[in-house]
């Protein structure tokens, strides 16, 4: 038997979810809460297997509840059920440590599938949002990689990299920075090695991708 705590500030939604879930003989709703503070109290008292949690709630919203649980070391399985299909909400929930994220327009079979998945130790993300999550994860990895390499670049090398991205030649860079052309060549060579590129075009793309310069 999977014991569920329903947390949503709309009683009609909780009632509908309870009737839907309890059609499955392996799922039982053991409690309901209409706000975040009551949710935390009931988790401590009832110890549900899964908390089915809305985001928009009074007193404490769902993400604040989730953050409180994780900061206090609570490993409670939490499945967010929400109308929010914006990737920012999903990324925030994933970063905090959510077990699953599902949209409210999902089919009942999908909801039950998500509950069983997280009970088996898996993470479950709404299929319509998975591509967005992958894209954002990729971008975060790029940014992490960029920050790591940025630390290797000196302030002067960053100036030279930005000038490269603007399309300036070595002589023009030397004039702008008031250094010798030979020094510019040395900086360019060092930059290529540090950010692992082989030509000026690749260096410019790197600078633009990692927001050293803006495309007008």
Image (cartoon, rainbow, N blue to C red):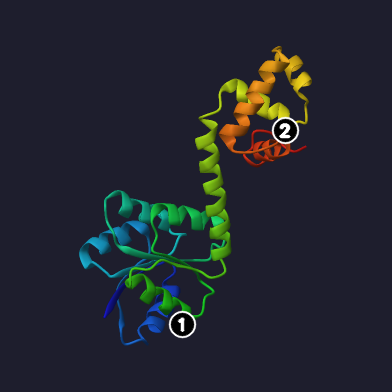
Query: Residue 181 or 30: which is nearer the viewer?
Result: 181
Crowd around label 1: few <14 · some 14–19 · many ≥20 (10 Å): few
- Residue 12 horizontal/vertical position (percent): 44, 75
Q: Nearer the viewer, mark 1 or mark 2?
A: 2
- Residue 146 horizontal/vertical position (percent): 55, 39
- Residue 5 horizontal/vertical position (percent): 32, 70
Task: From this view, report whether residue 160 is shown above or below residue 148.
Answer: above
Alpha carbon separation for disc pair 1 and 2: 52 Å
Instruction: Identify the image quadrant of the C terminus.
Output: top right
Residue drawn at x 54%, y 59% as measured from the top left: 134
Q: Image quadrant of residue 111? A: bottom left
- Lower position in the chain sequence, tag 1 or tag 2: 1
**In the picture provided, is 78 more to the left or to the right than 188?**
left
Residue drawn at x 29%, y 77% as measured from the top left: 2
Q: Can you tell which mark lies on residue 165?
A: 2
Query: Residue 210 or 111: which is nearer the viewer?
Result: 210
The residue indicated by pointer 1 is 109
Q: Can you tell which mark lies on residue 178?
A: none
SS at badge 1: helix
Crowd around label 2: few <14 · some 14–19 · many ≥20 (10 Å): many
Instruction: Identify the image quadrant of the N terminus.
Output: bottom left
- Residue 53 horizontal/vertical position (percent): 40, 65
SS at badge 2: helix
Kindly tell me whether residue 159 is visible in this rendering.
no
Q: Image quadrant of residue 97? A: bottom left
Residue drawn at x 40%, y 52% as measured from the top left: 96
Task: From this view, report whether residue 187 is shown above or below residue 26.
Answer: above
For the residues bearing labels 1 and 2, Cβ distance under 8 angstroms: no
Residue at the limit of the structure toward the left, as seen here: 45
Residue drawn at x 23%, y 61% as measured from the top left: 44
């Amino acid at each position: 038997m999977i014991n569920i705590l329903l947390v949503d500030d709309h009683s009609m939604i909780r009632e509908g979810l309870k009737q839907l879930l309890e059609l499955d003989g392996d799922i039982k709703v053991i409690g309901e809460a209409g706000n975040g503070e009551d949710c935390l109290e009931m988790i401590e008292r009832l110890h549900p297997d899964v908390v089915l949690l809305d985001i928009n709630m009074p007193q404490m919203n769902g993400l604040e509840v989730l953050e409180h649980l994780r900061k206090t070391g609570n490993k409670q399985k939490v499945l967010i059920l929400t109308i929010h299909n914006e990737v920012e909400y999903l990324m925030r929930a994933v970063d905090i440590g959510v077990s699953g994220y599902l949209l409210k327009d999902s089919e009942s079979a999908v909801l039950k599938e998500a509950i069983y998945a997280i009970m088996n130790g898996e993470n479950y993300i709404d299929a319509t949002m998975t591509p967005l999550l992958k894209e954002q994860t990729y971008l975060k990895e790029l940014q992490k990689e960029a920050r790591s390499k940025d630390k290797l670049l000196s302030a002067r090398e960053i100036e030279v990299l930005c000038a490269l991205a603007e399309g300036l030649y070595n002589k023009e860079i030397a004039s702008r920075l008031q250094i010798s052309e030979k020094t510019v060549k040395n900086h360019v060579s060092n930059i290529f090695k540090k950010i692992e590129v082989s030509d000026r075009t690749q260096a410019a793309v790197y600078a633009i991708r990692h927001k050293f310069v803006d495309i007008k």
